[in-house]
Image: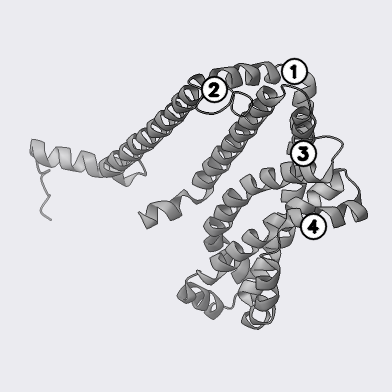
Amino acid sequence: MESRQPVALTATETETVSVTSRTGDGNTRPHERVLRSDRIIERSIIAARGVAGVLGFLALWEVVARYDLLPRDVLPAASTTLASSAELLGDPAFLGQIGATLWAAFVGFALAVVIAVPAGLVLGLSDRLHAATATVVELLRPLPPVGLVPLLVLVAGQGLEMKAVVVALGCVWPLLVNTIHGVHSTDGTARATARSFGWSQRTVALRVVWPSAVPSVLTGVRITVSVALILCVGAEFIGGSRDGLGSWLLQQSMLPGGIDTVCAGVVIAGALGLLVNAAVTALERRFAGWAHREDS
């Protein structure tokens, strides 16, 4: 038998084999590194624009206040408001009010998730149930939760229960609709293929439908988490809650010269909502970033 002699590779062929081996063993391919770098640059540009927008808004605010385009008792200067905000962040009593609002918003939001996500999966998987409940959902969705605060105060009092129910009522509908949409967006071929392998409806729901619905569910979470904070503060303000940021703002607004403190509290509330939204967005990219990459 004739023995084969080893074939010498040229430098170009050696480099090709080297690149192939590096990309074939699971390491990042060159084009993937380029795409990742482009995404980082794009996010940096978006962040820079956001910072520039905030600085421009603060500058405009300062000019309007300094030149008395609006009365000082209506709009204090931005620098004064930021200084008051820094003082409030060092006040343990104020931080306790923030904590009470965050806890009530979290409880109400968690209640909405526990109700809306399983219900959305069931309604999304059953066309008959979805058709039977669609009219009821559309009738209840427009109801403003804050408008129910007087009734809820009579039923649940002015404490945590009232605030949590208001938040849950406001968050449950967007979460429900987004979950149903995520279920309906599942590839029908994938579901049919899974059923052809003998998978039960429950297994198909857990292993095919749910992973496909996750991006839509997380989008609903990102939308409603900021709504939860707004509703909680509104419920505290209107319902005369004993604690929380809304109750604190109401008390400060009744004090002489309290406009500086009220504006500072509003700025802190806005910054808090921004931080929560950024955290949920990072969570969405972590667990459903593949969906956004496919869309792009």
Q: Which residue is mark 4?
A: 148
- Indicate the amino acid at tag 3: Trp
Which label lies toward us, 4 or 1?
Answer: 4
Q: Residues at badges 1 and 3 in contact (C-beta under 8 Å)?
A: no
**Which is in the foreground here, disc 1 or disc 2?**
2
Q: Position of residue 233 (x, y in %)?
A: 73, 41
Report the residue marked by disc 1: 91
Residue 37 at x, y = what percent?
Answer: 32, 36
Say whether residue 57 is visible. yes
Amino acid type shown at disc 2: Ala
Looking at this view, is 191 or 6 the one in front?
A: 191
Q: Residue 134 shows which numbered tag? A: none
- Assess whether mark 2 and mark 1 are in contact (beta carbons under 8 angstroms): no
Which residue does the numbered mark 2 point to in the structure image? 78
Q: Position of residue 77 (x, y in %)?
A: 55, 21
The residue closer to the viewer here, 51 or 40, is 51
Q: CA distance from mark 4 to mark 2?
A: 35 Å
Who comes first in sequence, dot 4 or dot 1?
1
Kindly tell me whether residue 9 is visible in this rendering: no
Q: Which residue is mark 3?
A: 103
Q: Are marks 4 and 1 in contact (CB under 8 Å)?
A: no
- Is label 2 in contact with label 3 (beta carbons under 8 Å)? no
- Mark in the foreground, 1 or 3: 1
CA–CA distance between discs 1 and 3?
18 Å
Q: Residues within 10 Å of mark 3 (few under 14, many from 20)?
A: some
